[in-house]
Amino acid sequence: MNTARPIAVISHAHPSISKGGAEIAAHTLFHGLRALGVPAIFIAAVPETERHRLDLGAGEYAVFHAQERYEHLYQLAEPAVARQLCAVLEATGAEQLVFHHFLWLGLNSLRDALALPGRRGLLVLHEFLAQCHNHGQMITAGTQLPCSSASPSRCGACFPTLGRQRFELRRRLVGEVFDQLDGFISPSRFLADRFIGWGIPAERLHVVENGLLHPGQPAPPRPASGRFTFGFFGQLNPFKGVDVLLGAAERLASVEAIEIRIHGNVIGLPEALQARLDRLAESLPQLRFMGAYENDQVATLMADCDYVLVPSIWWENSPVVIQEAYAAGRPVICSGIGGMAEKVPPGVSGLHFRRNDAADLARVMQSATDPKLLAKLQAGLPRPGDATSMARQYLAAMGLPLAAAEAEAPPPARKPNRAGSRRSG
């Protein structure tokens, strides 16, 4: 590999359009590499309908897609998406490719990009989409129970109208593209072990925790007032445990010492759950729905809370909200499963409750109104890594020591032909 050529960080979304953890982690890596002096570009898949909202920075590119024409079972995008991606890679000369997700890009785009001469690639695993057709959540489609392993027979039973044979084909297609990759990165040990159990050789998988672009300094503890504020931050969708949180709020309606704030944008909430959220936000005096927020506001908003709530009903991997909570100096109360349980040692930096159990969440929240317990948890908070520490670990996973990867950036490339948008790099 020619180390003077840029590293391409490729994401399924751009943070100016959506605020999910995967695109934020990808963007953080891009900035971390550039802060180290390593040439890097950022390529994001963007819905054609959102083109007007896109805000690209220096060294950033976009490839455009139509969400309604994406094939979700086999994870395939229109051929035009692959052509756009390959055009950007050829125009910029990027050879080392780091894919954060393949949703919207499509497995076919990864395949075609890796087939270009001299290209090598890593895939960052953010959830279970390679294994699970149910939005990559490893939650059964009917009963909404955690699924411990994926196989064509189990997936066929979960989606009986599709059947086993289609899932056998899906597994082969994923495997063929995965065989082209040099390796994989997982932000949690939990997710890594799940993929090793699924068939990825352990020696091909590196665990690298996500960093934060600007961790800052943790806020001091809030002045004692006898009232404890619990904050939820993130996307409001069924997998994030919004109904569990609302159930806990109902059970805590008479506890004057507790206030619950819900920060986030609504994405795909069932109509009944949306109506319930609206009704309880109006009727429960201690429950406040604060609406969407920008990423640069999260530290300030968390500083106004005593605890951060992560009530997800799926396994999660390495929720960026946990890193943000630690950076803000706030302990976490989370479901005691998966990557959440790994990132929040109980009694050290937070507390666990039983997954999908509103009564147990209410019990844990009430126990958390002990000032001595809060002080103990605040003292046990770890400091999250920053963008440059994350980038250094990625370089090591690529087999590129920093000294070898640092190089003067090449002159600006010609503008790609029909390969999306870019600003000056």
Image (tube, helix red, strand yellow):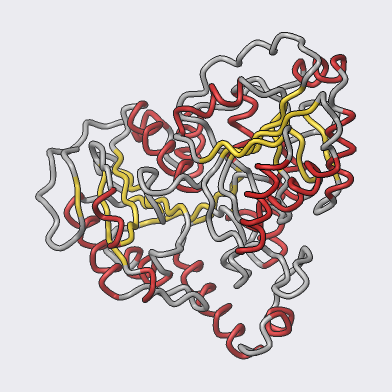
Above-or-below relation of 349 to 199: above
Above-or-below relation of 298 to 80: above
Residue 301 at what x, y percent from top left? 56, 26
Q: Which residue shows up at 50% across the image and 26% down it?
A: 386
**Residue 158 sits in which quadrant?**
bottom right
Viewer-nearest residue: 6 or 219 = 219
Q: Which residue shows up at 25% across the image and 55% down it?
A: 51
Q: Which residue shows up at 13% across the image and 46% down it?
A: 413
Q: Is residue 129 visible?
A: yes
In the drawing, does residue 27 fall left or right of residue 245? left
Residue 64 at what x, y percent from top left? 28, 62
**Residue 259 sits in which quadrant?**
top right
Viewer-nearest residue: 46 or 184 = 46
* Total numbered labels placed on residues in the image: 0
Q: Which residue shows up at 48% across the image and 36% down it?
A: 293
In the drawing, does residue 315 fall left or right of residue 184? right
Viewer-nearest residue: 332 or 186 = 332
Question: Outermost residue toward the left?
Answer: 414
Above-or-below relation of 374 to 110: above
Q: Is residue 209 visible?
A: no
Residue 311 at what x, y percent from top left? 73, 46
The C terminus: image quadrant: top left
Question: Outermost residue toward the front?
Answer: 283
Viewer-nearest residue: 153 or 89 = 153
Residue 137 at what x, y percent from top left? 65, 62
